[in-house]
């Protein structure tokens, strides 16, 4: 029984010592980048009412949420997604604000997914939300922020793939496919089940060119120039507007000097139904999952009572750390602590020395010698201590 108490549940893990320090340093570095873009901090509760994340909000399925009850019998869930709670806050505290609102956060999300063995169920996200700005300039700003965060983290080779939720919806409108069937088709295409997708499409009376375009969605990937041929295949205004916006977006990212990090994927379809415009995911070697995600969600805040366009981004810190480690790009943390080892008669001197050093922003540990023979240098190496000061036998030694 005692051994069992030492283990964590499936899907969560301890992060400690050097790894935890590295994670904290990276979070601080990226958090600073968010502040440089004018974002201010927000914290939302780790658990909320179930309805915040229900099906209409377009977040994860009910069976993948950690649910429990309060004393009044209300169903509560650990947040599986950071965006709906922030949308709730905006509707509650900024209902009448019409100018842009910028908030950023660092927090954990909890998804009880059993799809992949070993996949973490608690994930740290660092992200930003820009409310009350529907412009393509806001889209470009969030993508630029994402790229700069990944560069700040130390990544050298990565790509941000950009899709357009409205493009798919426009194709569904033009094909006359109802919302329920469109959702089924979206899931099939997202899972690359093109046989299932073709079965649905073949039953519809759709022009051959449009039918082939829908079935080719997973292949519509690359530079924007390679994808512009789709404009000749569609007449739906919504889909055409989506492509035009991507063109304007790329021109703005070129002005940021970040165009080389951007590719386009018209087959990118998010499981989050609240996305209404661009969707993006950043990938790098060392992990198969995205290290950053985001997109535009112009209808979500309105579900809480405030009609406001919005766009957000989030860096998946656990995936980012994994990628950096496998690429051997993790920042090396210096052993900065000083250990003062003292005998009892030197206690006052040791405390005074520690107090002075701490006032100089130096990290100091105090250790009263027990009289037993110990290898202090070996202990210092294990604990990441860079310096040892001895106060004993009327003389001070500094190592």
Image: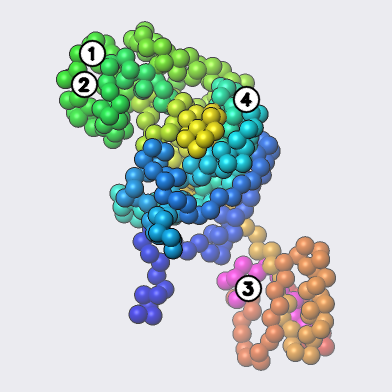
Whether residue 314 is visible here, answered yes or no, is no
Count all numbered tags in the image, as a single digit. 4
Say the numbered circle drawn on residue 182. none
Say the numbered circle drawn on residue 256. 4
Looking at marks 3 and 4 on the same chain, the residue that comes earlier in the sequence is marked by 4
Mark 2 and 4 residues: CB-CB less than 8 Å, in contact? no
| Identity of the residue drawn at 50% across and 29% down | 298
If the image is split into quadrants, where does the C terminus sit?
bottom right
Measured from the top left, where is residue 208 in percent x and y? 23, 11
Mark 1 and 2 residues: CB-CB less than 8 Å, in contact? yes
Left-right relation of 93 to 355: left
If the image is split into quadrants, where does the N terminus sit?
bottom left
Residues in magenta, as a range? 379-391
Q: In the figure, residue 256 lies in which quadrant?
A: top right
Q: Nearer the viewer, residue 182 or 15?
A: 182
| Identity of the residue drawn at 70% across and 85% down | 368
Does 384 appear in magenta?
yes
User: How crowded is the residue under tag 2: few (<14 C-alpha within 10 Å), some, or many (20+)?
Assistant: some
User: How crowded is the residue under tag 4: few (<14 C-alpha within 10 Å), some, or many (20+)?
Assistant: few
Mark 2 and 3 residues: CB-CB less than 8 Å, in contact? no
| Identity of the residue drawn at 75% across and 89% down | 344
Residue under label 1: 206
Does 219 appear in magenta?
no
Q: Nearer the viewer, mark 3 or mark 4?
A: 4
Q: Nearer the viewer, mark 2 or mark 3?
A: 2
Say the numbered circle drawn on residue 201. 2
* Residue 137 against residue 235 in the figure, above or below: below
Residue under label 3: 380
Looking at marks 1 and 3 on the same chain, the residue that comes earlier in the sequence is marked by 1
| Identity of the residue drawn at 27% across and 11% down | 209
């Amino acid at each position: 029984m005692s051994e069992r108490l030492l283990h964590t549940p499936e899907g969560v893990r301890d992060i400690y010592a050097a790894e935890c320090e590295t994670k904290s340093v990276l979070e601080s570095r990226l958090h600073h980048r968010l502040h440089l873009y004018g974002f201010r901090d927000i914290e939302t509760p780790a658990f909320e009412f179930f309805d915040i994340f229900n099906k209409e909000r377009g977040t994860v399925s009910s069976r993948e949420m950690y649910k429990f009850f309060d004393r009044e019998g209300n169903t509560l869930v650990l947040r599986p997604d950071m965006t709906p709670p922030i949308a709730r806050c905006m509707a509650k505290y900024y209902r009448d604000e019409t100018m842009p609102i910028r908030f950023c956060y660092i927090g954990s999300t909890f998804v009880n997914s059993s799809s992949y063995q070993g996949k973490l169920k608690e994930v740290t996200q660092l992200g930003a939300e820009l409310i009350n700005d529907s412009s393509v300039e806001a889209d470009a700003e969030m993508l630029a922020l994402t790229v700069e965060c990944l560069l700040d983290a130390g990544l050298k080779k990565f790509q941000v793939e950009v899709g357009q939720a409205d493009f798919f919806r426009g194709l569904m409108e033009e094909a006359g496919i109802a919302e329920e069937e469109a959702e089924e088709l979206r899931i099939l295409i997202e899972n690359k089940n093109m046989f299932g997708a073709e079965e649905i499409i073949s039953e519809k009376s759709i022009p051959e060119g449009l039918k082939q375009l829908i079935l080719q969605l997973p292949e519509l990937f690359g530079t924007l120039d390679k994808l512009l041929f789709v404009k000749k295949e569609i007449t739906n205004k919504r889909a055409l507007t989506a492509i035009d916006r991507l063109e304007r977006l790329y021109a703005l990212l070129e002005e940021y000097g970040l165009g080389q990090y951007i590719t386009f994927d018209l087959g990118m379809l998010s499981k989050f139904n609240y996305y209404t415009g661009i969707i993006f995911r950043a990938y790098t070697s060392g992990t198969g999952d995205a290290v950053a995600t985001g997109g535009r969600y112009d209808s979500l805040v309105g579900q809480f009572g405030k009609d406001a366009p919005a766009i957000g981004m989030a860096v998946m810190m656990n995936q980012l750390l994994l990628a950096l480690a496998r690429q051997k790009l993790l920042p090396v943390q210096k052993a900065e602590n000083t250990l003062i080892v003292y005998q009892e008669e030197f206690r006052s001197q040791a405390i005074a020395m520690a107090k002075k050093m701490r006032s100089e922003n130096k990290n100091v540990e105090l250790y009263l010698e027990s009289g037993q023979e110990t290898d202090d240098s070996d202990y210092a190496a294990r604990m990441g201590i860079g310096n040892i000061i001895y106060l004993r036998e009327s003389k001070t030694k500094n190592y």
